[in-house]
Image: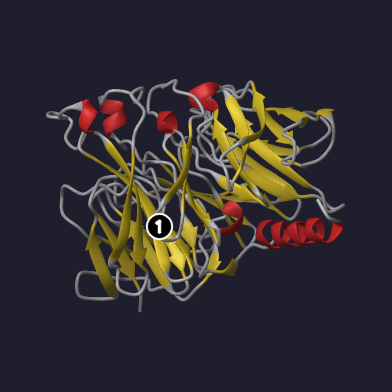
Amino acid sequence: MPRLRFFCVVCLITSLCCSESVPAQQWNRFRGPGGRGVAEADLPATWSETENLAWKTDLPGKGSSSPVVWDDRIYLTAYTGYGMELENPGDPAALMLHVICLDLRHGNILWDCPIKPSPDEQALSKRVGEHGYASPTPCVDDSGVYAFFGPSGCVAVSHQGELRWQRNLGTKTVGFGAAASPILFGDLLIQNASIESGTLYGLEKQSGEIRWKTDGIQSAWTTPTLVTLPDGSVELVVNQKLATLGFDPHTGKQHWSCDAIQDYVVPCVIEHDGLLYCSGGRSNKTFVIRPGGRGDVSQSHLVWEQSRGANVTSPILVDGHLYWSHDKSIALCLRASDGEEMFRERMPTRSRVYGSIVSDGSKLYLTTRDAGVLVLAAQPEYKELAVNKLGTDSERFNATPAIASDRLLLRSDQRLYCISK
């Protein structure tokens, strides 16, 4: 890579990965730039069908992926034809996957790109029915939108809605199905296909060809994290069963490992001020490590660990504090410097939580599956600001919200809602 181009890529990644909040118009991947879930915005604390609801749009299919935003367009994934109802799923041969584009200002559907599923897609079960066949969140840049559909592979779609390529990354299925979302790094699309093939992939985003692949990724439904080291180099971090791993994102070569969670892992690692905050597993463990190094860094790089966290949702870090919404309807706050618990409160909504918290810097938005969005003050003292419920009793909100400028995007399995003052 020419020196100038390499320098530009490093500067771009540094800007995305090393600032707590960035301008929110480009919410370009799962949990936004850097995967942190924080963006500078002026979002309302309350809304209803008659207050601060800019628009709502019926979606042509179901799904649990989060929306992503590039300029004035929203992208998300969905599925149709099969598995719409657990009791009467229909014909598996009728399953169709979709990448959908909407207008940010009005919520109009601009195009719908159908994606042919793999014949190896797993049959509908109670577990799969919790979220369906379109759960990983796409990522987007000026070249197009990229999505992952588990056994049906990765796809690239142009901003005009044309399918550019589709790449199979393995067809194994386990339990709940696919969840890990793709991320972009320079000219690479990086995908954790732990469940489908036990492999971490670096694909050429223009063609879908495999640049590199690294095997041995275990029981990881988590989306990878990019972190910039003090010397300007970039590491790719994956949290998996038994270990957190650091790789060279250019080649897929493993640099280090740290003993970690003795269980499957769903939450993403987040980076802040040169530290990696890792959590997950049914033990709800959280630990903090320094990136960098070589070999086993379990002793040398561990900063602190705590038996608090969440099994499903990823944490968020705002003003020196970590926050979670536990899947069993518990709101949790730890001090980021040492892991001391600041609060652990039962949420008033008493509903399961699958989506992770997002924040506009002053407020926390905790989305429950069927009891609305709990809004908390972003402070280490527990303070409820509002509970806002939209939709019908049959709607389920599995997706993590997205922030676009001063708009909050909420996705249910039936509709997309835009919240704005």
Would you place residue 286 above or below residue 1 in this image? above
The x and y percentages for residue 266 are: 50, 35
Q: Residue at x 25, y 34 (%)?
A: 95
- Quadrant of the rendered structure where residue 308 is? top right
Which residue carries the number 1 mark? Answer: 75
In the picture shown, does residue 106 fall above or below 177?
A: below
How does the figure colour the protein chain or chains? secondary structure
Q: Which residue does the image show at 24% across and 63% down from the upper left?
A: 57
163 or 283: which is nearer to us?
Answer: 163
Residue 122: image x %, image y %? 33, 23
Viewer-proximal residue, 343 or 135? 135
- Quadrant into which the C terminus falls: bottom left
What kind of residue is marked 1? Tyr
Where's residue 378, x and y in %?
A: 51, 64
Q: Which residue is drawn at 50% across and 32% down?
A: 221
Q: Can residue 8 be seen in this view?
A: yes
Position above or below: 185 against 24: above
- Residue 387: percent from left, percent from top: 30, 62
